[in-house]
Amino acid sequence: MITLKLLDNCYVDTIVQWYRSGKYKEFFRGWPNQLEFPNVTTLYQLDPNSIFIGIFDNHCIRGLITLGQINPKVKSVVWGLMVQEGDYKRSALAIPAAKQLLHYLFKEQNYNKLYSYTLAKDQHIVRLLEMYGFTREAILREHCYFDGQLHTEYIYSILKSEYKE
């Protein structure tokens, strides 16, 4: 059973180890060029109002959702999602976690817009975002430097009025 819960400081070391070891798959990024930052602590310093939500499977942390750039006036938030590498299928965690998060943000927290960044080359992620009704709003050509190359990024978003459970 996949569950989401707000993280406290006791999980920071685990998440920083994931970043440093490369033992995670980042599905969506909450900030452009996030791949250039060395760890979660650095990301947190970019936006101290960020919210970190753990993805748990059988009471073990398996992933992380970040919510940042929260804009209370327009009720928008940018999100990132990463899942720890393991013997299980990563999408088996990402899909239910995304579904729970969308419901929580739109139905319980009354947000109006959720958006994210993804690399254009990651077509499985593009398909996942589009499956949930996200719309590609922008193409940022050669915007992100990763693995020694420049990559194109997409910005995807979904409005509350477009969300279907």
Image (cartoon, rainbow, N blue to C red):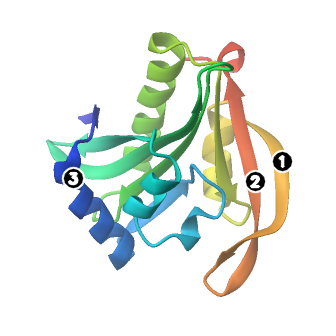
Q: Residue at x 45, y 29 (%)?
A: 101
Q: Are marks 1 and 2 in contact (CB under 8 Å)?
A: yes
User: Mark 2: few, some, or many residues within 10 Å (few <14, many ≥20)?
Assistant: many
Q: Position of residue 56 (x, y in %)?
A: 24, 42
Please state the horizontal and vertical placement of residue 41, each as a whole percent of the image: 38, 60
Amino acid type for the residue under numbered disc 2: Tyr
Residue neighbourhood size for the residue with mark 1, other residues' Cα within 10 Å, grouped as few (<14), some (14–19), many (≥20): few
Residue 154's disc is 2
List the residue tagged with mark 3: 11
Q: Nearer the viewer, residue 119 or 2?
A: 119
Image quarter of the N terminus:
top left
- Label placed on residue 8: none
Question: Of callouts 3 and 1, which one flags the residue occurring earlier in the amino acid sequence?
Answer: 3
* Residue 134 appears in the rendering: no
| Amino acid of disc 3 | Tyr
Task: Return the x and y of residue 125 as percentages of the image width and height.
Answer: 61, 53
Residue receiving disc 1: 138
Between the residue at mark 3 and the residue at mark 2, the CA separation in whole angstroms equals 30 Å
Write the residue at 45% across / 73% down.
38
